[in-house]
Amino acid sequence: MHTIPPSSQTSPALRGALLSLSLSMLLSSLGTSIANVGLPALAQAFGASFAQVQWVVLAYLLAITTLVVSVGRLGDLLGRKRLLLGGMALFTLASVACGMAPTLGLLIAARAAQGLGAATMMALTMAFVAATVPKHQTGSAMGLLGTLSAIGTALGPSLGGLLLAGLGWRALFLANAPLGLLSLWLAWRFLPADSDAPKTTIGFDPLGTLLLALTLGAYALAMTLGRGHFGALNGVLLLAAAAGLGLFVGTESRVASPLIRLSMFHDPLLSASLASSALVATVMMSTLVVGPFYLARALGLAAPMVGLALSVGPLVVALTGVPAGRLADGWGAQRVALLGLAGMAAGACLLALLPMSFGVAGYVAAIAILTAGYGLFQTANNTAVMTGIAAGERGLVSGLLNLARNLGLVSGASLMGAVFAFASQAADVATAPPEAVATGMRVSFAVACALLLAALAIAYAGQLRAGRSQRRAASASV
């Protein structure tokens, strides 16, 4: 492990390393949100349908979802700095390729490559924090990464709109290049070197990697194709994902060096953290799916005001990240994670009971409570997991945390959208009457509250089981 000693906690090397990792997190989250605003312009530029240009977003999302665990494991085997530098370089070059793409097909291919670079950056950034920052400051560093991730998500639509209006759609992707180069230089200059010579890939599991990628790809496509309207193709993809999961579990139980050791999930803290993270991400996606319709249709806000109201959530998360990290360092990450889940459940419950007469102020206040809880949970949950994991598995576990979050997001976009549409009882939510949209919003967040209470129960049970295991281990060693 390459932990920087406490005497140099404020050294330029540590500050440079954290700046590089923060930029890496910012860029990967910005890449997710900035392209959405450009889809109408891309459809016009390439003479394509929405179903075709949405692959500009899906290619990036699928690459991250299918590969984030595998690149995390490769980082553990080959050296994290080497792979992170390669991921940053690929992200930067792919951003330039996106901006210069002459056809939609090449743009989609470049976005897939950009997603691979982003998967590497996401998986290894948290692993590097756990390896380089002193343990008593890990929460603060994780909070900083959470802040930059939220800023990237919130900045995407507004920055994308400005670039689109002033410079055209190509600028949406070319804007990543200067920051990518800066992040690459900072990582090369300040991140601690891999101490050992590159290891061979004998310990890598190519069959398990392929099966996991195909399984996750099938599930992500099932959840995203049709924009929430399930058809025969979605059902086939879900069946393929279920079959792929069975094959993957069977393969991992037999190979000598599995991609994911199934015994890892016997760790109650890790299993509970991954499950609660997926449920939390599902709920957070509901704010993006339901919120715009409620603000526009039920409350009658114009588009600029809808965008302003939606920016409150990411802003609260950004402001919460660093204080949440310090609280996790001082009070205990597991306690803060439970506090965050309780806050999220309270916010979702308020939204489920919210009368339309409370207007924008009521909605924004409840969203602020929910997203503040999210900021607490995300920072504390990542801190609790990454500080308790073996050094040789940090990349893999970081990939699993990112995967759980991503699966929650793609599931939430489909499932919570379906709940909202069903509860609104309208053929088209975009033209539903205000009362119907308000009812859909309240039912959706009632479901979200139930999911968060389940996540709270899972997390609390996982912490109890982990505590009992530790006490038994301590008594056995006496």
Image: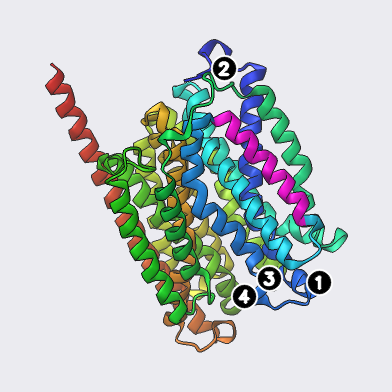
Q: Are marks 3 and 1 in contact (CB under 8 Å)?
A: no
Judge depth for marks 2 and 4 and give the one in front: 2
Main secondary-structure element of the magenta-colored stretch: helix
Q: Earlier in the sequence, mark 2 or mark 4?
A: 2
Q: Which residues are magenta?
A: 80-98
Query: Picture quarter containing residue 349?
Result: bottom left
Which residue has dot 3 on it?
Answer: 53
Q: Earlier in the sequence, mark 4 or mark 1?
A: 1
Within-10-Å neighbours for mark 3: few <14, some 14–19, many 20+: many
Residue 18 quadrant: top right
Q: Position of residue 359 (x, y in %)?
A: 56, 70
Residue nearest the viewer, comparing 216 with 151: 216
Instruction: Classify residue 413 as left or right of residue 48.
Output: left
Label 4 Cα neighbours within 10 Å, binned few <14 / some 14-19 / many ≥20: some
Residue under label 4, please give it.
Answer: 296
What residue do we see at 42% from left, 39% from top?
397
Q: Residue furthest bottom?
A: 427
User: Which marked residue is nearer to the observer: mark 1 or mark 2?
Assistant: 1
Q: Which residue is mark 1?
A: 45
Residue in the foreground of this view, choosing between 21 and 332 = 21
Mark 1 or 2, nearer chain start: 2
Circle 4 sits in a helix, a strand or a loop, which is it? helix
Q: Secondary structure at mark 1?
A: helix
Instruction: Kindly identify the residue that appears in the image at 63 percent across and 76 percent down.
Output: 51
As drawn, the label of residue 9 is: 2
Magenta segment: does it hold 90? yes
